[in-house]
Image: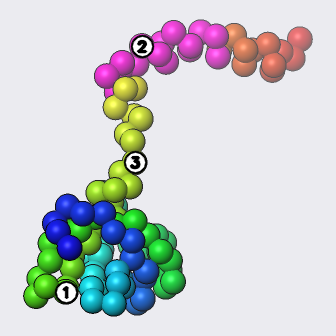
């Protein structure tokens, strides 16, 4: 097993600091809580449960059979908001007058 490899592993136990994984008969691993998401992880059980089988990335191998694993490095979420931030408020400015007009048409009390 090499650093950078992608492996399948079954969650065998969950602790506050991470989840233990059985990769095969010779290798066990740990997904540290910081390797589940780029965002704050309050509870690992929001991400995995005992018995789940996941594709994971090998970060390092110690003592030939203990493996550090990552979930987030294979399952990164695309950041859609970056495109919107580059455009600034221009999309809102373009739509604002349409929204105001539609509001008054829907709420016309005359």
Disc 1 or disc 3, which is closer to the eye? 1
Q: Mark 2 or mark 3, which is nearer the start of the sequence?
A: 3
Q: Which residue is rendered at x = 30% and y = 63% of the image?
A: 6
Disc 3 or disc 2, which is closer to the eye? 3
Q: Mark 3 or mark 1, which is nearer the start of the sequence?
A: 1
Observer-nearest of 78 and 62: 62
Observer-nearest of 90 and 52: 52
Q: Main secondary structure of the magenta part?
A: helix
Disc 2 or disc 1, which is closer to the eye? 1
Q: Residues within 10 Å of mark 2 (few under 14, many from 20)?
A: few
What residue sits right under mark 3 in the picture?
A: 77
- 1 relative to 102 in the view: left or right: left
Q: Mark 1 or mark 2, which is nearer the start of the sequence?
A: 1
Observer-nearest of 86 and 47: 47
Q: CA distance from mark 1 to mark 3?
A: 30 Å
Q: How is the image coloured?
A: rainbow
Q: Residue 90: give its label.
A: 2
Q: Residues within 10 Å of mark 3 (few under 14, many from 20)?
A: few
What residue sits right under mark 1 in the picture?
A: 65
Q: Which span of residues is magenta-colored?
A: 85-99
Can you give x and y, in whole percent of width and height, for residue 5 in the image? 24, 63
Residue 18 seen from this side? no
Can you give x and y, in whole percent of width and height, for residue 99 in the image? 64, 16
Q: Is residue 47 above or below residue 77?
A: below
Location of the N terminus by quadrant is bottom left
Can you give x and y, in whole percent of width and height, for residue 61 in the image? 14, 77
Quadrant housing residue 96: top right
Helix, strand or loop at label 2? It is helix
Q: Which residue is rendered at x = 17% and y = 69% of the image?
A: 2
Q: CA distance from mark 3 to mark 2?
A: 25 Å
Q: CA distance from mark 2 to mark 1?
A: 54 Å
């Amino acid at each position: 097993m090499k650093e950078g490899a992608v492996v399948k592993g079954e969650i065998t136990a969950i602790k506050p600091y991470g989840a233990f994984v059985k990769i095969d008969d010779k290798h066990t691993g740990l997904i540290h809580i910081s390797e589940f998401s780029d965002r704050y992880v309050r509870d690992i059980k929001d991400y995995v449960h005992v018995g789940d089988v996941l594709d994971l990335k090998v970060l390092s191998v110690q003592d030939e059979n203990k493996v550090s694993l990552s979930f987030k490095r294979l399952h990164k979420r695309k950041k859609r908001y970056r495109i919107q931030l580059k455009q600034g408020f221009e999309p809102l400015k373009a739509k604002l007058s349409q929204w105001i007009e539609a509001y008054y048409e829907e709420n016309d009390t005359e």
